[in-house]
Amino acid sequence: MKVCLINPHWTFDGSIYFGCREPHLPLELGYSKALLEREGHEAEIIDAHMDDLSHEDVRLRVEAFAPDMTVVTTAPTYLFWRCAPPELRVPREVIDTVRPHAGRLVAVGPHGSTTPRAALGKLEVDEIVMGECEEIVVKLANGEDRAHMPGLAFRHEKMESGIKVNGGPQAATFTDLPALEWPDAWVKRHRHHHHRFDREPNAPGAEVEASRGCPFSCSFCAKENFRDKYRKRDLPTLMAEIDRLIAQGVEYLYFVDEIFLPDKPLLDALVERDVEFGIQTRLDLWKFPMIELLGKAGCVSIEAGVESITPEGRAMLDKNCKLGTDELTERLIHAKKFVPFVQANLIELPTDDPQQIAAWREVVRERGVWANDPVPLFPYPGSPDYRKLFGRLDDQAWERAMDYYLREYVDFSDIQEDTPLPLADLERRAAE
């Protein structure tokens, strides 16, 4: 079977989207392509974001490839599934454009994983994949019977709602994934170094994945329906992927892992390689010698999940943090001695006094650590916070979360560029 895998050209005007707007390697499509080819299928990735393609450019490429099945992702790479744009405007525009040439249409991503019926209705595709997508895409291409395939939603005239949802979101094995091989031309164009602030890039960057999931269950994290259970990738396979990227000229890697945990064998392997990297982690899990090894291995950027400067705030977020604020501060400052850029992430909470936050930010800033203005909490569908506020997910979950956010927060964070618009206004643009 010929399978086309599309990463749209993302635009975020009026969106609540918190993530980076630069192109990143579409890891979920890369894994899907590798597994499809392992099964004897022909697969092609069209990365409209990386290649700066218009919807019409994408249509022409799909028409030329003439696929039997086309897969479209609803979030810009696995890195941002947990904080995806709530709206489905861009995926719907792409789907409508390629529909005459796409063959069977399949959507993957966080929207279908959390609200499959709503996503199916908005996108008007043949199937919605729920959960991590790479293995289910292969099952569809292999011709397995969708009627009994877990993790799939599709229209079914015998169902009262007109839609059949098979089971719940699925988790991929992950540990057996092969080393990804990206085209030289893609790597050369990938000049962005995600979350790097110590200097301007001199050579390409890339994204890789050493682990998936997280052993913690913080209340704000939308990982209940994908990338939940913690799994580690086989180290020789991971290093083979990294070595290929280095040979292609990559000088910086960003690990998309939900939480980059202390891993001495991996860090020892990175010490031996001429590459720098960035991570997101919790420094309360790192001992001082391991923080020093992290810097020696080439880490130049740490995004550290602090979230709150008070024990009460961290408890409210179910952080399960064993250290006090002074100890966390000490680790942040110690990390800055070995890593050029260290960021402490903060979330806006009623337990934290604004004046105390400002004073703490100034303390760490004077020691070289950047702490953001606390971010208003968006209750992502699929997070414990959403359930606490609204109960179980239904077809209006994304709209409900967006309305709540716009109603509760008049001022927005310094990491947001625009005031967000209501979800209905954003998605209406795709229909016009």
Image (cartoon, helix red, strand yellow):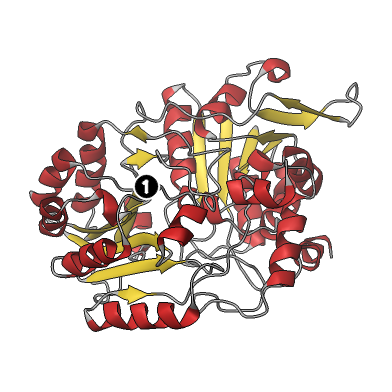
Query: Foreground: 371 or 193?
Result: 371
Quadrant location, the N terminus? top right
Q: Which amino acid type is shown beneath numbered disc 1?
A: Asp
Q: Position of residue 114 (x, y in %)?
A: 66, 41
SS type, badge 1:
loop
| Mark 1, residue position | 257
Query: Foreground: 170 or 374?
Result: 374
Q: Is residue 274 above or below residue 265?
A: below
Asked where in the image residue 136 lies, by quadrant, the reply is top right
Query: Foreground: 220 or 241?
Result: 220
Q: Residue at x 35, y 78 (%)?
A: 360
Whether residue 67 appears in this view of the structure is no
Label 1 neighbour load within 10 Å: few <14, some 14-19, many 20+? many
Q: Residue at x 75, y 34 (%)?
A: 126
Q: Position of residue 117 (x, y in %)?
A: 78, 39
Q: How many numbered circles does the render carry? A: 1
Q: Residue at x 44, y 57 (%)?
A: 314
Query: Foreground: 349 or 137?
Result: 349
Left or right? Give the position of 44 relative to 291. Answer: right
Left or right? Give the position of 180 relative to 3. Answer: left
Q: Position of residue 229 (x, y in %)?
A: 44, 33
Asked where in the image residue 141 lies, by quadrant, the reply is top right
Q: Is residue 297 above or below residue 166?
A: below
Whether residue 13 appears in this view of the structure is yes
Q: Position of residue 140 (x, y in %)?
A: 61, 25
Quadrant location, the C terminus? bottom right
Q: Is residue 74 above or below residue 194?
A: above
Left or right? Give the position of 420 relative to 44. Answer: right
